Image (cartoon, rainbow, N blue to C red):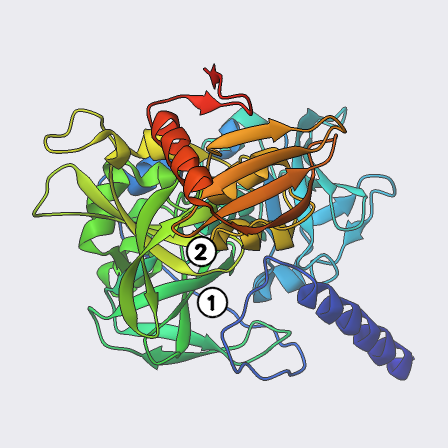
Amino acid sequence: MMKKTILLAAMALAVLNASAQDNPYIVKTKNVKKTDIKSTATSDGFDSKSTEPKDFLGKNFRYYSLCDWQDGMRFMVMPEKYDLLVNTFHDAVSKNEVSSARLRYSIMVYKGHEDMPNGRVHVNFYCETDGKRYYYELPNGMFDDYCMGKLGVPTLAYLGDVDKAKELLLDKSLITRTEYFRIDTEYDGEGYQEVKYPKNKLVTVKAVGVGTRSFPVKIIVEDENGEQFFQNVAMSKTNSGLRDDEFDLDNAKYLFAGSFEFTGGEMAVSADIGSYLNKVVYTKYQSMMSSKGSGKARDVVVPRYTGFIIDAIVGDKNNPGFYALTLRESESRRIYYKDVTFRDDVPNATKEDFFGYLFGMGEGMSRNTTLETRTAIREGRVIPGMTMEEVEMAVGVSSSQITTSDGVTEWMYPRSNSVLVVQFDKEGIVTKAGARRATSTSSNSARRMAEKNAKGHRISGNGTPVQ
């Protein structure tokens, strides 16, 4: 009987380990060893001292008491040692208790509470992981009386905080505010080792996942040497089970501000334009930007409809109203830099400096082309298969257009000693593109057409201006 029990336990742990590896909320520091899962109790605390931008937590991480829980709120079962001895949930169909260990890492979706005929109250959940329904039975009292405290539902780490932290903090630069952090020691379990790291060091957020019930946001950071460590922190304190008067200075690191602080530029941005961080944008117009190649910064021309992710926004102390954007190109992942304003009334700013003029939100048309075409557009080349709009994205508006009797359309672009001729079929798709040697007559004609085009006109094949 004992052997059978041990075998069943081993099988349960194997399933648990597999689910943990496939779970995007379970993140680990680098070089963690793959070991058998072990239970690790944590007795963490934190205080209410805050040094992050004044509205960062209040604006982004709302506290929800059980009274305020809304249908659809998501939690993850993260039992600690005590929870492994006392089962939290019942199967809604069989009414039987369910082991907290079996439900570990399961995602529970809140589905409201229900007053039962026997006078007890059930807090209902749908489990995304196994598709079953479960409930937590309140130990005593009416729902309104119970939910006023901070007891909540045992084992549940609030995923709303994790999702929001991932959105706001991933790839961001932070400064360490404590010397005490952790590194993972188990790939499949919750084991960790305490480590010391100097204060006031610049680190980058590399991953955000689930921590514990009390401190649900696990923030993994990396220093300039590639070393990774983490902290489990409380953000909104939703379902934390802790009261403010239980937090002391020794445990301040388990509040976000106790472990991390934004860099100066990020702090200034957070209150004003922080909502643009991590957003996907595209260039509505061709623009000059800076980029680093071979270790040197140089100016490059970025074509229309190039997609970017905004990695950082830093205020320019010498030019009030201007901000330096760090932009990660969506396709190549290359880093670009662009100075912009977010108001169109900043002194000494041109129209091209205004963020809203240059950039559109989302992917725009940057994903309506093939990879090969997008590469050609970035390099200013025309290749067969392009549409007329893609040609304009690559080389601009043509100086002249000619349509032959058999339906072939030619666009011409004057060069110093030649003319780039682009041919389209009847469907407007490029069939051929190449340079022709320019005669003096054709060169002068092309130059005149280009001058008219620069004044806002497009010239048709017969020389008639087209508005």
Q: Secondary structure at mark 2?
A: loop
Q: Residue 300: horizontal and vertical position, in percent? A: 34, 55
Q: Residues within 10 Å of mark 2 (few under 14, many from 20)?
A: many
> Which of 217 and 419 lies nearest the eye of the viewer?
419
Rounded to the nearest angstrom, the CA distance separating label 1 from label 2 is 10 Å
> Which of 111 and 198 lies nearest the eye of the viewer?
198
User: Which residue: 22% across, 26% down?
Assistant: 344
User: Which residue: 81% across, 39% down?
Assistant: 92
Q: Residue 401: horizontal and vertical position, in percent? A: 56, 29
Q: Is residue 138 left or right of residue 451?
A: right
In the picture, residue 19 is in which quadrant? bottom right
Q: Residue 257: horizontal and vertical position, in percent? A: 27, 54
Residue occupied by mark 2: 215
Position above or below: 20 against 351: below
Q: Residues within 10 Å of mark 1 (few under 14, many from 20)?
A: few
Position above or below: 115 against 287: above
